[in-house]
Image (tube, rainbow, N blue to C red):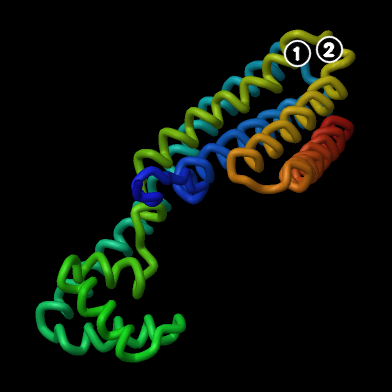
Amino acid sequence: MNLFSTHTEGHLVKRIGWLRAAVLGANDGIVSTASLIVGVASASSAQNEILIAGIAGIAAGAMSMAAGEYVSVSSQSDTEKADLAREKKELEETPEAELQELKHIYMERGLDEPLALQVATQLMQKDALGAHARDELGISEFTTARPLQAAFTSAITFTVGALLPLLTAVLVPGSLLIPAVSVASLVFLGTLGALGAKVGGASLLIGAARVTFWGALAMALTAGIGALFGTTL
C-alpha cells in the first residue's frame, strides 16, 4: 500500500483567511461595545441610555467591520490579480527568462542548478502561471484574498462578540454595571484569545493574555474619558 495515498494532513494554515477575520471581528465586538458601555456608564447616564448606546454601537460596528474588511481585502485581491496578469503576460512574451527566474528561485532554496532547472521546467509545463504565483509571488490557495468571506465573517463575529457585554449590562443592576461588564468582558476576551490560539495551533496562555491586555487597556481609557466628561458636565 502506498503510504502517501492514505496520508492526509489538515494544515492549520488553511484556516488563516477566515480565522483572522473571525478573531478580529469578535475581539473588536467585545472591546468596542464593552468600552462604549463602560464609558457611557462612567458619565452617570441612565441604564436605558447605556443600552441604547450599546445597541447602536453593535449596528454601526458590524457594518463598519464588514465594509472595512471587504474594502481592505478587495484591495489585496486587486493587487494579486494585477500581479498575476503581469506574470501571465511575461510568460507569453519571455518564457525562457521566466524559466530561468524560476530556476534561480529553486537554487536559492537549496537545489543544485541541474535539478532546479529540471523542477522549473516540469512545473512550467504543467502550470506555468501557478508555479510563478506560488513560488515567485507567494500567492497560494491558502492565502488568496476572499473579500466576501472576510466581510461576512467579521460582521457576524463582531455581532456575537458585542452581544456578550450588552447582555451582561442588561442582566445586572445599574450599580454593578461597570464592574460586571468589565470583568465579564475580560473573561470573554481571554476565552476568545485562548480559542483563537487553539484553532490556530498557538499557545493558549499567550493568546488569552495579549487579547485580555489590550481589552483592559481600551476599557480603562474609555472609563476614564467617561468619568472626566461626566464630572465636568
Rendering coords of residue 89 (x, y %): 14, 76
Please say if 157 is above or below 65.
above
Residue carrying label 2: 174
Question: Would you say residue 82 is visible in this rendering?
Answer: no
Please say if 21 is above or below 157.
below
> In percent of the image, x 62 and y 26: which residue is there?
162
**Left or right: 71, with 176 as reference point:** left
Q: Amino acid at mark 1?
A: Gln
The one nearer the camera, 46 or 202, is 202
Label 2 and label 1: CA atoms lie apart by 6 Å
**Left or right: 43, with 78 as reference point:** right
Question: Would you say residue 15 is visible in this rendering?
Answer: yes
> Is disc 2 placed on a helix, strand or loop?
helix
Rendering coords of residue 173 (x, y %): 83, 8
Task: Residue 85: name its quadrant.
Answer: bottom left
Rendering coords of residue 122 (x, y %): 21, 74
Rendering coords of residue 117 (x, y %): 27, 85
The one nearer the camera, 60 or 211, is 211
Q: Earlier in the sequence, mark 2 or mark 1?
A: 1
> Pointer 2 and pointer 1: residues touching (CB < 8 Å)?
yes
> Is disc 1 placed on a helix, strand or loop?
helix
> In percent of the image, x 49 and y 51: which residue is there?
13
Residue carrying label 1: 47
Q: Amino acid at mark 2?
A: Gly
Circle 2 Cα neighbour tier, 10 Å, few/some/many (<14 / 14–19 / ≥20): some
Please say if 150 is above or below 37.
below
> In percent of the image, x 55 and y 26: which residue is there?
159
> In percent of the image, x 71 and y 19: which residue is there?
50
